[in-house]
Amino acid sequence: MDLVKYSKSIFEDIKHIDENCNEYWEARELQKMLKYKEWRKFEGVINKAKESCIQSQNNVFDHFVQLDKMISIAKGARRKINDYKLSRYACYLIAQNGDSHIKEIALAQTYFAIQTRKQELLEKEISEEEKRIATREKTRKGNLTLNQTAKNSGVKNYDKFHNAGYRGLYNGESADDIAKRKGLRYREEILDNMGSEELADNLFRIIHTERKLKRDNISSEGDALDTHYEVGVRIRNTLKDLGATMPEDLPTPKISMKELDKK
């Protein structure tokens, strides 16, 4: 198998495109391609790749998004399994942490090294302001979807619902507490005054709260608030375990998103 055949016939064939036109790969499919028979061993490689991501000062949640899947097993029964939604960079890190004695992994390492370098050259042209604008737009769209799902789950008080998520992620801080800490004016939107990393933390909270509300068939406001808080706490604990900066410790940009839009 040569590199050209590998890149065109195998790796790119398992690429997915999400609703925002972003490319991604599923870890379970990548596992088979890299000839790992056991998920347990492959997940160990993924964990090493996550550490490499952190050491490279990249936001691990931008590249490794955990997924839950239901699969069919014997006699029509179904079982939940773990999976990951991976960026191209995440796939590269996984390959780099794999066993290079395996031919498929050696090919993957070469292929991803070339492709990731191309991507790095492109990303050097993207400023923090551009990342911030793009991530803020995703949080805006994510909150619209979350609000609709929350409504279907019995939520009537949206301020209380969103505060539950903030309290979980920000160690007890409400939206008002965050605004005061940032020195914002009355009713000024806190998401408009976050950098790209803090926005990414909140986007992760938004996405997984919306999914959990649906997955658990939440149908009361109290349960919806508890779910949002729980997701926030879990994300915070994951950030802590990974050695990441806590959201409340990230710097507030000098200019708000409204000022940035005008600029």
Image (cartoon, rainbow, N blue to C red):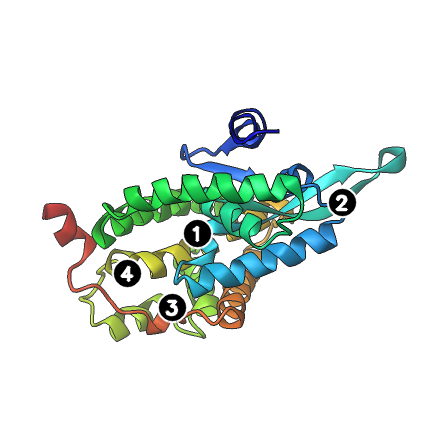
Closer to viewer: mark 1 or mark 2: 2
Q: How many marks?
A: 4
Q: Is residue 248 above or below residue 150?
A: below
Residue sticking out furthest to the left: 263
Residue type, numbered disc 3: Pro
For label 1, the crowd category at 10 Å Cα-Cα, with few meaning under 14, some 14 to 19 and many 20 or more, is some
Could you give the CA–CA distance between mark 1 and mark 2, rounded to whole angstroms? 27 Å
For label 2, the crowd category at 10 Å Cα-Cα, with few meaning under 14, some 14 to 19 and many 20 or more, is few
Say what secondary structure mark 1 lies in: helix
Who comes first in sequence, dot 2 or dot 3? Answer: 2
Residue type, numbered disc 1: Asp
Could you give the CA–CA distance between mark 2 and mark 3, rounded to whole angstroms? 38 Å
Say what secondary structure mark 4 lies in: loop
Q: Nearer the viewer, residue 184 or 24?
A: 24
Residue 152 in sight in this render: no
Residue indicated by mark 3? 247
Residue indicated by mark 2? 37
Residue indicated by mark 4? 194
Could you give the CA–CA distance between mark 1 and mark 4, rounded to whole angstroms? 16 Å
Residue 100 relative to residue 178: left or right:
right
- Residues at discs 2 and 3 in contact (Cβ within 8 Å): no
Residue indicated by mark 1? 62
Q: Is residue 163 above or below residue 70?
A: below
Closer to viewer: mark 1 or mark 4: 1
Task: Indicate the position of residue 202 as horizontal and vertical percent values.
Answer: 40, 57
Task: Indicate the position of residue 123 as horizontal and vertical percent values.
Answer: 30, 46
Q: Is residue 255 above or below residue 87?
A: below
* Residue shown at the point (47%, 57%) measured from the top left: 60
